[in-house]
Amino acid sequence: MAEQFWGERWLCSDSEISRKYMEVSAAKNSLVCLAADRNTMSGLLELVEEVGDYIAALKTHVDLVDDWNPEYWADFCRLAREKNVLIFEDRKFADIGKITKNQMGGIYNIKGWSDLVTAHLISGPDIVDGIQAAWNDEGRIGGVLLLAQMSSRGNLLDPNYTNKVVDLGKVHDGVFGFIGNGSRPEEIKSLREKVGPDKMIWTPGVNISTGDGEMGQRYGDPREAVLAGSDCIIVGSGIHKSDNPKEAAKAYAEKSWNALLERVI
Ligand code: 5BU
C-alpha cells in the first residue's frame, strides 16, 4: 500500500526502517513527527495519548524531562508502540565512534528503545558505526539521521559542509537519512537534489504560522517543505503548545499528507 503513495522513495529504498516509516505514514495519512518537548512524564503521556493517532513518529529529548525515571519511560515507550509510531531520540550525538556507542547506553539506554537518532558528522563517519554497533548489541535495528542542515538562524552548517555530510551519508547503510532545514524550501530542494531519491529527508522548523520563532528558531510552511522534498515534517510547539493539540496534529497530518499526494502525482 505504501508504494503507491511514496513512489520512487519506496522503490529505491531497501532499508527496513525506511519502509516501516513509509508504511506507518501511509496507514495514518500523516507525515508528522511530533517533537514532544514537554518537561514532565505526565505531560508527555497525555500528549501521546491525545495525538498519537495522527503522527507517524515521536521525537524525544530524553534529557530534558524533570521527573524522568526508567519505569515511566518504559510506559511512555509502550504507549508510543501501541499508537504505532517510530520513536526518535534527537540526541545529536557528535563524539568519536566508541564513545557514541557507549552514550547509546548509560542511564537513558537510548539503544534499548529508539528506532532513530540524530548525529552530527563533525567527528567523521565512525560515529554511525558506533551507533549501529550499540543497536546491534541490543538485537535491535535503527537508523541514523545525519544533520545536513539546521533550522536555527546563524548555524554553521554551510553548503560545503552539507555536501560532505551527504556524500558520506549517502553510501552508508546505517544512515536512514538527513535532517534538512524545514524553514527554507529552497534549501530542502537543493538538499534533495544532492541526496537523490533513496534516503529520507526529515525537516524541523515547520509551523503553519511561518516566520521567526523563539531564540533563533525559524519556521517554514508544512506543504512547501514536503513539495520541496521533505519526507517528514517535525513539528513541536505547533502541536504541543496549541490550545487543542489533537486538532493541531490532525491539521498538520492533513497538510503534510496532501502535499505528498501532490508531490507524487
Ligand atoms: P518547535 O517547537 O517546532 O520549534 O520544535 C522543534 C524541535 O526540532 C525541537 O525539538 C528541536 O530540538 C528540533 N530541531 C530543530 O528545531 N532544528 C534543528 O535544526 C534540529 C532539531 Br537538528
Image (cartoon, rainbow, N blue to C red):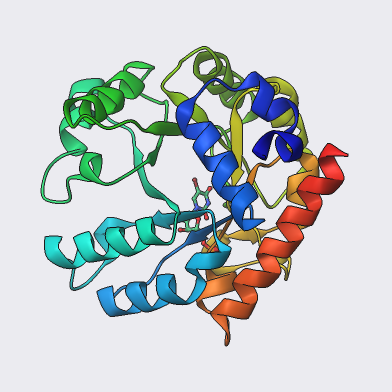
Residue 205 in sight from this viewpoint: no
User: Which quadrant is home to the N terminus?
Assistant: top right
Q: Identify the residue at horizontal 63%, vertical 52% (top origin).
A: 31
Q: Identify the residue at horizontal 47%, vertical 77% (top origin).
A: 50
Rendered view: 252 above or below 244: above
User: Which quadrant is home to the C terminus?
Assistant: top right
Q: Is residue 187 left or right of residue 168?
A: right
Give the image location of residue 205, x and y in percent.
61, 56
Of residue 156 and residue 130, the one placed in the foreground of this image is 130
Q: Identify the residue at horizontal 55%, vertical 17% (top origin).
A: 170
Q: Quadrant of residue 110?
A: top left
Q: How many marks?
A: 0
Rendered view: 206 above or below 200: below
Q: Identify the residue at horizontal 28%, vertical 79% (top origin).
A: 42
Outermost residue to the front: 1
Give the image location of residue 142, x and y in percent.
36, 33
Rendered view: 88 above or below 64: above
Q: Is residue 169 left or right of residue 192?
A: left
Give the image location of residue 111, x and y in percent.
23, 39
Of residue 127 and residue 14, the one placed in the foreground of this image is 14
Of residue 214 and residue 174, the one placed in the foreground of this image is 174
Q: Quadrant of residue 19?
A: top right
Residue 171 in sight from this viewpoint: yes
Give the image location of residue 263, x and y in percent.
83, 41
